[in-house]
Amino acid sequence: MESSKQHLILIGLMGSGKSSVGRHLSALTGLPYLDTDWMVESQMRKPITEIFSQFGESRFRELEHEMVCKATSEPEPAIVSTGGGAVISPANREILWKRGLVVYLQADAELLFERTSRDQNRPLLHTENPKARIAELLEARAPFYEQADLIIPIRGKSVQQVGGEILQRWQPSKND
Ligand code: S3P
């Protein structure tokens, strides 16, 4: 049976707070929290950095696609957090937009850099100039992120505030 547009799907670049907001919403609503990065790591039993270095980004993208399908096929509503690059794939976009309310956690490159600069498990930022890389990724992906059903600017807001804004617009409903 086709899943309906029932999940809450968080998109946005690395550092936009998808995981923290997703876990917070899960605690508030009692819905399961699924994180496609975490699902890839758990299937491969390796951190993302190692998956990239051993198998390459294209293999990671295949696994990410499998997890996007799996996470959004759950029959009951869930909070689904996606990796920052999941929206690049037209197939992922089709599934995500069909099966959930897509929420973009929007932040500028400066803030995203501040929030990711101490984290080593982000292979795309293992470059000489991670700040420029973030700006580049944001520019390339913004057209996809901006197609979200709901855009929440996050600068200056706590996880609780962002979660509250989302819940004003989305309430989980059970399938009939
Ligand atoms: C990526 C973002 C990461 C992870 C992988 C690739 C990207 O997820 O999927 O390192 O392409 O932007 P987060 O956005 O959760 O950090």
Image (spheres, rainbow, N blue to C red):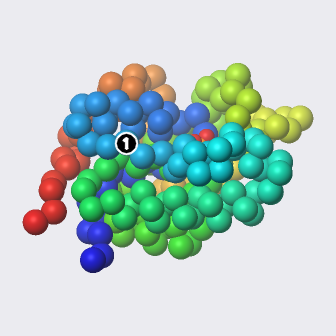
- Tell me: residue 16, above or below residue 56: above
Residue type at mark 1: give it.
Answer: Tyr
Q: Position of residue 54 (x, y in %)?
A: 83, 51
- Tell me: residue 150, above or below residue 117: below
Farthest right residue in view: 128
Farthest left residue in view: 176
Q: Quadrant of the C terminus?
A: bottom left
The crowd level at tag 1 (other Cα within 10 Å; few <14, some 14-19, many 20+) is: some
Q: Is residue 22 left or right of residue 14?
A: left
- Residue 123 visible within the image: yes
Label 1's element?
A: strand
Residue at left offset 20%, top offset 49%: 172
Q: Position of residue 48 (x, y in %)?
A: 69, 44
Asked whether mark 1 lies closer than 8 Å to ligand 1, one says no
Residue at left offset 34%, top offset 30%: 24
Residue located beneath label 1 in the image: 33
Q: Is residue 19 left or right of residue 136?
A: left
